[in-house]
Image (tube, coloured by chain):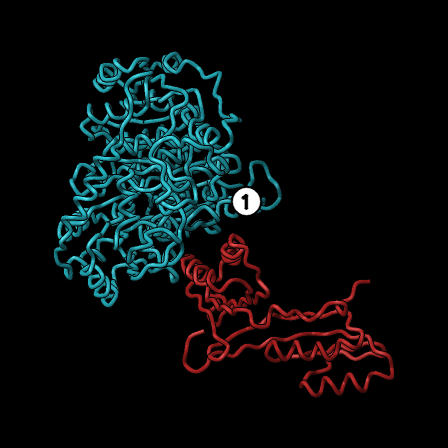
Chain colours: A red, B cyan
Amino acid sequence: MTSDSSFAPLPDIVGGHTLSMFVNNEPGVLMRICQVFARRAYNLDSVVVSRGRDPQFSRLTLGISGDPAGLEQIIKQCNKLIDVIHCFEHDESESVTRELALVKILINPGDQGEVLQILEHFGAKTVDLGTASVIAMIHGDSNKVDAAIHLLSKFDIVETVRTGKVVMARGEATT
Amino acid sequence: MSTTKLDGAQALIKTLNDLGIEYIFGYSGGAALPIFDALETVSGNIKFILSRHEQGACHMADGYARATGKPAVVLVTSGPGAGNTITGIMTAQMDSIPMIIITGQQVTWMLGKDAFQEADTFGITMPVVKHNFLVRETNSLPRIAKEAYHIATTGRPGPVLIDVPKDISQSEFTGDLDPDIDLPGYHPETAFEINAEAVTRAAEIISYAKKPVILGGHGVMIARADAELMELATTLNCPVTTTLLGKGIFPETHKFSLGMLGMHGTAYANKAIVECDLIINVGSRFDDRIIGQADKFGALAKIIHIDIDPSEMNKMIHPDVEIVGDAKAALRALNKQIKPLETSSWLATLEGYKKKFPLAYRKQGGLRMQQVLDELYQLTGGKAVVATDVGQHQMWAAQFYKVNASYNWLSSGGAGTMGFGFPAAIGAQFARPDDTVVAVVGDGGYQMTLCELATAALHKLPVKILVLNNHYLGMVRQWQEMFFDNRESGVNLEGNPDFVKLAEAYGIVGFNIKRPADVGKVLQKALDYNDGPCVINAECIKTENVFPMIPAGAALEDMLVEPPKHKMAKPIGST
């Protein structure tokens, strides 16, 4: 069985670029956006899509790694799409980003205490606890999630599922 | 609201008619049956033209748009019908041509089930359109048609596709026939708000220039800013070069005109770009065919870039001043702030280059395409609408057929689509029945879409089809000669039909030109013939090469004005 524990935490989410988009809630919109990135060989590290408060629109947060010089073009290309209301890049200092991860760890009876202690330190929650496994829910900025997973990786992590980051501009600025 | 019952297809055709659509070019088929039926049942001014292939229908609509600035509609069926439009749509998208494509589609409940003639047209066409729609509600058809028209014709124009499932088109329509459009993410009106600060900075940079050049592109034509461009050039005493698609925005017979620049542009236009201290780019996207090696383009020059599309800024070239907006609005603002420049010595230098490196050809040793095009230009006084195909003949036509007005030069630039010229000429002739329209094609591209001879013959269109026939894919052969040790591969068109006899099979008159001395006489006969289309087959030298030439990716200063005497390295640029 392949387990996630053999992989280092995803480093490219850290320090990557975060774009937020406000788009029409229509079939095919995500495809149009993905084509802009794929045509220029940019990789999407994370994609979070959800319906907006007005269901006519959707919110997208994209985590991207790639050449910052090309990113200006990509943002303009995205803004050019008829279905995109706006697309912004958000600087870390002027925005709040959060991510949530579920981590499934197989534990020996003797390790349970230490696992729970690490989770408590990160303000994580135990959402499923069995005799031989635990599912932890970690949330925070991506660095914090990375750090928690890193500390837990001495145990047998069998699966991690991350939501990808969501972003919101600080203060009165528009996301 | 309508008093008589309509179906979706009728509501769609009625909306297109109300939008002022004059022509629909297309090809029928099962999934489009309700829409084709509506063409018969809805009264209006729309004329339907049956092409012989869907690609031809697209190029006809494209030619119509390039000759008028107005969009036409393409109507085809699902699956292969839609698939055959891809090249035509891509051609329009690359050159910012307005077009509305309506494709029939399988019924909605069969979508995604590999039903007969089902294809994911919405998905397949997404990368080659400005926007597309898959219609899911019959009552939304008028709104979507209006939105498609609005998107296709405003901002930077482009093709918009509407995929209409058959159940949607044949269901009863109970909605509003004149609804408001709803495009919250599309604001072409902002193109008319010109950044005053950028204009002031541009005017200041201009005031220091001693060796300025204006580079005009298709954006000037789309914005109908020819007069403003003329004012800019004449106020500044500034020479003007244009892109392939910009031919006509500034009279090429004007003393300030340098003709076309770029890969096969004039030596003097390219030398002007190399030596100038200011480039004012109005409505060109700095295409790779004109800039060559990007970091050496206009290396001594300040660059002002005026473009309606913000995503063209900094894409190829980093300008000193960006003015995002409509070319006419931007030039009006700029023209208010500029003062005449002293450029007499610069103009004299360029005049010297025009004398030293003229566009020239020999009349001895066989018939050359250049001569045919030169004489065509002389005989028509440069007033014909010229639609070209793609290749050597296209570049020679750009060099020798001088164009003095917008909408008279139709050529596939960005996509470089072979097979474009003849159907585009058909579209242009429908649009402008009283003008002389000449399709200038090579023997390669012509054979890709010559099934449209039936369309031209049926409608007795007086289009002149000038086949510059060298029995080769000449441009590719030229590259093989220059860069691949003259190893010919996949370029010999042996087996060409007799184009005159082929024309006769369609009831079309044909002429042959075989000797340099016959060119004027035969062309005149063809130009005088007005009882339907005619084909002029000019048997040209097989192995002539186009010069000047800048190998792809090379700097403009590395231009070859004549055949190289040494073996060339393979070009580093794209194609």
> Residue B218's quadrant in the figure?
top left
Q: With respect to residue B95, does B441 lie above or below?
A: above
> Residue A110's quadrant in the figure?
bottom right
Looking at the picture, tell me which residue is in the foreground, B239 or B42. Answer: B239
Identify the residue under disc 1: B120
B29 relative position to B404: left or right = right
Most extreme residue toward the front, as rendered? B566
Residue ID at (21%, 43%): B350
Q: With respect to residue B384, does A87 lie above or below?
A: below
B321 relative position to B238: left or right = right
Looking at the picture, tell me which residue is in the foreground, B378 or B134. Answer: B378
Residue ID at (41%, 78%): A173
Can the viewer see residue B543 in this picture?
A: yes
Residue ID at (26%, 65%): B198
Where is residue B284? Give x, y as percent.
31, 49
Tell me the subunit letter for badge 1: B
Where is residue B475? Give x, y as percent.
42, 30
* SS category of the residue bearing label 1: loop
Where is residue B187? Give x, y as percent.
33, 60
Numbered disc total: 1
- Classify 10 Å Cα crowding around label 1: few (below 14), some (14-19), many (20 and above): some
A79 relative position to B517: left or right = right
Where is residue B398? Give x, y as percent.
30, 34
Amino acid type, label 1 = Asp
Q: With respect to residue A27, does B242 lie above or below?
A: above
Can the viewer see residue B177 in this picture?
A: no
Residue ID at (27%, 49%): B275
